[in-house]
Amino acid sequence: MKVQYLQRHRGYSLLELAIVISIIGVSAFMFISLVAPGDPGGQINSGASTAGSTDRRLLAAESLASGQSQLMGFLRARNRLPCPDTTGDGQENCDATENTTGRPQQVGVLPYRSMGLAQPLMNSDQQAIVYAVYRRPHATAARDMDLAVLRNRKEPDLPDNTVTGISNAVDFCWAVRNAALASNSADYVHTHVENPLSQAFVLVDPGSADADASGSVTDGPNSPSHSSQAWGFERPAAQLTETYDDVVLSVGFGQLAARVGCPMILGAVSSAARAAVAADDVASLTDFFADFRAYALTVAEQDITMADVSLGFAVTGGLLTAVDSGVAIAQGINSGGTAAAAAAAGIAVSVALQVESLVSAGEGVGSAREARDDSASLRDSAVSARQQTRNYADTLLQTAIDTEREARLR
């Protein structure tokens, strides 16, 4: 009896509880769906609409990621971004200009033929992906910011005003640097239409249809008929609504520079150039030192000549003293003993001075020759050092040129 009582009052099982909770949850969801107010403002509020928005972004993310990957591949191969296709033939139209301003056309579609692709880039609804690139040319190459044109914008500061004439990743990175330092402008590709924020490039997945009935498959600021500037695009994080189903991907200058390694490229080229300039300065100093030592040797050789001349004068003076001494002695003898003694004393002093002069002249010649030998040794050492430093400077100059030539976007 007791066992039966316990069995009758054991309560619900876990399975029974799970079923009850599931029924309550479904009932609550159906009730909320029935009583939830509408969305007159066009915002996506319901669970179903939010799911649709997420699905739309996921599909757009695939097409935009593909477009961005192809752009980066073109950039690494050509050291520039492609010009937009403005005619629909799949080719770049780099010479196309805006009718009213004459500025280069910055908006079109991806030039798939120029990019080596078999077919245009379409979204999941078979609509072409819109492509815009920052093109801001300048007459002075060093200040140019046209990311779709490769030109020699940056020559490294090398010794002797050496010009490499190379156009590659260094020049693209210099254009990106210029653009990053320039002020934001509504005249060039930008997002945040009310407060323009310049972008290196923009891709737009236009959705499936003309959601805002603007006459273009793109909506809002992305539409050519929008009242905003022609180069303006909606923010990438803009909410999807019944009248806006575009998804925007934009890449700024700093983001692009970091992605392709511009800081490292410009830093490596600049460092190599500075090292070459420093080595050239050292080589120039050794050139001066070698020239100075050569001049010192010339002076030493001239000193030997002067010492030889002084020695000759001393010898000649000694001979004249000897002659004068003989004459004085003869005159002294003729004059008497006292005069002879005086003459002899004078002769002794004169001879002593001449001997001293000869000794000094001889020492001067010896010293001059020693100085000449020392100068010759120093000159030879300086010339050897000059050759070594010049060879080193030439090596660093070539290294700097090679560093620039081999610069690659990664």
Image: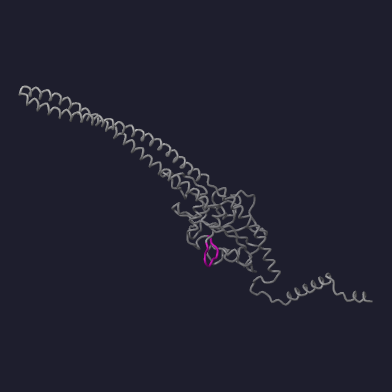
Pick whichever, 86 or 110, lies toward us. Answer: 110
Give the percent coordinates (x, y) of residue 22. Answer: 79, 71
Q: Which residues are magenta?
A: 189-197
Give the percent coordinates (x, y) of residue 133. Answer: 54, 56
Left or right? Give the position of 242 relative to 355: right
Q: What predominant SS class does the magenta segment belong to? A: loop
Is residue 303 covered in magenta?
no
Left or right? Give the position of 238 relative to 52: left
Residue 235 can be seen in this image: yes
Q: Quadrant of residue 298?
A: top left
Q: Quadrant of residue 393?
A: top left
Task: Kindly give the residue lying farthest to the left in the view shown.
Answer: 335
Q: Quadrant of the N terminus?
A: bottom right
Give the percent coordinates (x, y) of residue 211. Answer: 64, 66
Left or right? Give the position of 298 relative to 110: left
Query: Which color scheme did the rendering employ for the protein?
Result: one colour
Task: Say if 399 sits above or below 81 in the image.
Answer: above
Q: How many marks?
A: 0
Pick whichever, 204 or 396, lies toward us. Answer: 396
Is residue 191 covered in magenta?
yes
Pick whichever, 25 or 116, lies toward us. Answer: 25
Residue 89 can be seen in this image: no
Give the percent coordinates (x, y) of residue 60. Answer: 65, 60
Please tell me which residue is depicted at 70% across the width and 66% down the height of the picture.
51
Left or right? Give the position of 226 relative to 37: left
Pick whichever, 115 or 160, lies toward us. Answer: 160
Please tell me which residue is depicted at 64% across the width and 55% down the height of the picture.
66
